[in-house]
Image: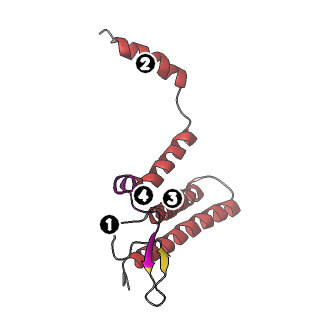
Amino acid sequence: MARRGLSRALDGVWNSIGRPSPFICFIFAVVLFFLVTSGVVYDMVVEPPYIGTIRDPNSGRKMPVTFVPGRVNAQYIIEGLTSGVFFCLGGLGLIFVDRALSSPILSKDKLLVGGIGVGLVSISYVILTYFLRTKVRRYMI
Protein backbone atom coordinates (compact mmCIF):
# COMPACT_ATOMS: atom_id res chain seq x y z
CA MET A 1 0.00 0.00 0.00
CA ALA A 2 1.49 3.31 -1.06
CA ARG A 3 1.79 6.12 1.46
CA ARG A 4 0.36 9.49 0.71
CA GLY A 5 2.64 12.50 0.10
CA LEU A 6 1.81 14.38 3.32
CA SER A 7 2.40 11.29 5.45
CA ARG A 8 5.83 10.79 3.90
CA ALA A 9 6.67 14.46 4.46
CA LEU A 10 5.67 14.28 8.12
CA ASP A 11 7.77 11.17 8.78
CA GLY A 12 10.96 13.23 8.68
CA VAL A 13 9.50 15.76 11.11
CA TRP A 14 8.36 13.10 13.61
CA ASN A 15 11.67 11.26 13.42
CA SER A 16 13.65 14.45 14.09
CA ILE A 17 11.54 15.38 17.14
CA GLY A 18 11.91 12.05 18.90
CA ARG A 19 10.00 10.61 21.82
CA PRO A 20 9.61 12.83 24.92
CA SER A 21 11.00 11.62 28.22
CA PRO A 22 8.63 10.27 30.90
CA PHE A 23 9.29 13.32 33.07
CA ILE A 24 8.22 15.68 30.27
CA CYS A 25 5.03 13.63 29.85
CA PHE A 26 4.43 13.82 33.62
CA ILE A 27 4.89 17.62 33.64
CA PHE A 28 2.53 17.92 30.68
CA ALA A 29 -0.08 15.80 32.51
CA VAL A 30 0.22 17.87 35.72
CA VAL A 31 -0.10 21.17 33.84
CA LEU A 32 -3.11 19.82 31.94
CA PHE A 33 -4.66 18.61 35.23
CA PHE A 34 -4.11 22.06 36.74
CA LEU A 35 -5.73 23.80 33.78
CA VAL A 36 -8.74 21.49 33.81
CA THR A 37 -9.34 21.60 37.57
CA SER A 38 -8.86 25.35 37.82
CA GLY A 39 -11.55 26.01 35.22
CA VAL A 40 -9.48 27.81 32.61
CA VAL A 41 -11.98 26.92 29.87
CA TYR A 42 -14.80 28.41 31.97
CA ASP A 43 -12.70 31.51 32.55
CA MET A 44 -12.07 31.93 28.83
CA VAL A 45 -15.73 31.45 27.86
CA VAL A 46 -17.46 33.43 30.63
CA GLU A 47 -14.66 35.94 31.33
CA PRO A 48 -15.37 36.47 35.03
CA PRO A 49 -13.51 39.17 36.98
CA TYR A 50 -10.28 38.37 38.77
CA ILE A 51 -11.89 39.08 42.15
CA GLY A 52 -15.30 40.41 43.10
CA THR A 53 -16.45 43.18 45.41
CA ILE A 54 -19.30 43.58 47.88
CA ARG A 55 -20.45 46.61 49.82
CA ASP A 56 -19.89 46.64 53.54
CA PRO A 57 -23.32 47.25 55.12
CA ASN A 58 -21.87 49.32 57.98
CA SER A 59 -19.42 51.62 56.20
CA GLY A 60 -20.65 51.41 52.60
CA ARG A 61 -17.14 50.76 51.29
CA LYS A 62 -16.38 48.14 48.66
CA MET A 63 -14.57 45.08 49.99
CA PRO A 64 -12.77 42.47 47.85
CA VAL A 65 -14.29 38.97 47.67
CA THR A 66 -12.43 35.95 46.35
CA PHE A 67 -15.32 33.45 46.30
CA VAL A 68 -18.68 33.72 44.57
CA PRO A 69 -20.97 33.16 47.56
CA GLY A 70 -23.82 30.68 47.25
CA ARG A 71 -23.07 29.56 43.69
CA VAL A 72 -21.16 26.34 43.13
CA ASN A 73 -21.31 26.65 39.34
CA ALA A 74 -19.64 30.10 39.16
CA GLN A 75 -16.18 31.32 40.09
CA TYR A 76 -13.80 34.24 40.05
CA ILE A 77 -10.45 33.67 38.35
CA ILE A 78 -8.43 33.68 41.59
CA GLU A 79 -10.82 31.14 43.13
CA GLY A 80 -10.32 28.69 40.27
CA LEU A 81 -6.55 29.08 40.22
CA THR A 82 -6.14 28.53 43.97
CA SER A 83 -8.43 25.52 43.88
CA GLY A 84 -6.41 24.09 40.99
CA VAL A 85 -3.18 24.55 42.95
CA PHE A 86 -4.57 22.64 45.92
CA PHE A 87 -5.96 19.87 43.69
CA CYS A 88 -2.45 19.50 42.21
CA LEU A 89 -0.88 19.45 45.68
CA GLY A 90 -3.27 16.69 46.72
CA GLY A 91 -2.41 14.69 43.60
CA LEU A 92 1.29 15.21 44.25
CA GLY A 93 0.74 13.95 47.81
CA LEU A 94 -0.89 10.79 46.45
CA ILE A 95 2.11 10.25 44.17
CA PHE A 96 4.45 10.63 47.17
CA VAL A 97 2.45 8.08 49.17
CA ASP A 98 2.55 5.66 46.23
CA ARG A 99 6.31 6.13 45.87
CA ALA A 100 6.82 5.53 49.57
CA LEU A 101 4.84 2.30 49.51
CA SER A 102 6.15 0.84 46.26
CA SER A 103 9.79 1.82 45.88
CA PRO A 104 12.72 0.02 47.52
CA ILE A 105 14.12 2.92 49.53
CA LEU A 106 15.34 3.05 53.10
CA SER A 107 12.83 2.82 55.90
CA LYS A 108 13.60 6.30 57.24
CA ASP A 109 13.25 7.83 53.78
CA LYS A 110 10.01 5.90 53.18
CA LEU A 111 8.60 7.40 56.36
CA LEU A 112 9.65 10.91 55.32
CA VAL A 113 8.25 10.65 51.78
CA GLY A 114 5.05 9.00 53.02
CA GLY A 115 4.63 11.63 55.72
CA ILE A 116 5.06 14.45 53.22
CA GLY A 117 2.51 12.77 50.96
CA VAL A 118 -0.05 12.30 53.73
CA GLY A 119 0.55 15.90 54.84
CA LEU A 120 -0.02 17.28 51.33
CA VAL A 121 -3.21 15.25 50.88
CA SER A 122 -4.50 16.31 54.32
CA ILE A 123 -3.71 19.99 53.80
CA SER A 124 -5.31 20.08 50.37
CA TYR A 125 -8.42 18.27 51.66
CA VAL A 126 -8.86 20.65 54.59
CA ILE A 127 -8.34 23.78 52.48
CA LEU A 128 -10.57 22.63 49.63
CA THR A 129 -13.31 21.72 52.11
CA TYR A 130 -12.93 25.19 53.63
CA PHE A 131 -13.25 26.72 50.15
CA LEU A 132 -16.45 24.76 49.56
CA ARG A 133 -17.84 25.76 52.96
CA THR A 134 -17.07 29.37 52.11
CA LYS A 135 -19.01 29.08 48.86
CA VAL A 136 -21.94 27.08 50.23
CA ARG A 137 -22.98 28.04 53.75
CA ARG A 138 -23.75 25.19 56.14
CA TYR A 139 -22.06 22.58 53.92
CA MET A 140 -21.24 19.36 55.85
CA ILE A 141 -22.16 20.85 59.23
N-terminal-most mark, 3 or 2: 2
The type of residue carrying mark 4 is Thr
- Label 1 and label 4: CA atoms lie apart by 13 Å
The type of residue carrying mark 1 is Asn
Number of residues whose C-alpha sits closer than 10 Å to that of mark 3, classed few (under 14), some (14–19) or many (20 or more): many
- Label 2 and label 4: CA atoms lie apart by 34 Å
- As helix, strand or loop, the secondary structure at mark 3 comes to helix
Q: Which residue is mark 4?
A: 37
N-terminal-most mark, 1 or 4: 4
> Which quadrant is the C terminus positioned in?
bottom left
Query: Which of pointers 4 and 3 indicates the residue nearer the eye?
Result: 4
- As helix, strand or loop, the secondary structure at mark 2 comes to helix
Position of 117 compared to 133: left or right?
right
Q: Are marks 4 and 3 in contact (CB under 8 Å)?
A: yes
What range is drawn magenta here? 41-54
- Residue 57, quarter of picture: bottom left
Residue occupying the point 49% across, 78% down = 63
N-terminal-most mark, 1 or 3: 1
**Looking at the rendered structure, which numbered label has been put on residue 73?**
1
The type of residue carrying mark 2 is Leu
Number of residues whose C-alpha sits closer than 10 Å to that of mark 1, classed few (under 14), some (14–19) or many (20 or more): few
Query: Which of pointers 2 and 1 indicates the residue nearer the eye?
Result: 1
Closer to the camera in the image, 9 or 109: 9
Number of residues whose C-alpha sits closer than 10 Å to that of mark 2, classed few (under 14), some (14–19) or many (20 or more): few
Q: Which residue is mark 3?
A: 88
Query: Which of pointers 1 and 3 indicates the residue nearer the eye?
Result: 1
x, y (%) of residue 49?
A: 43, 63
- Label 1 and label 3: CA atoms lie apart by 20 Å
Residue occupying the point 42% across, 14% down = 9
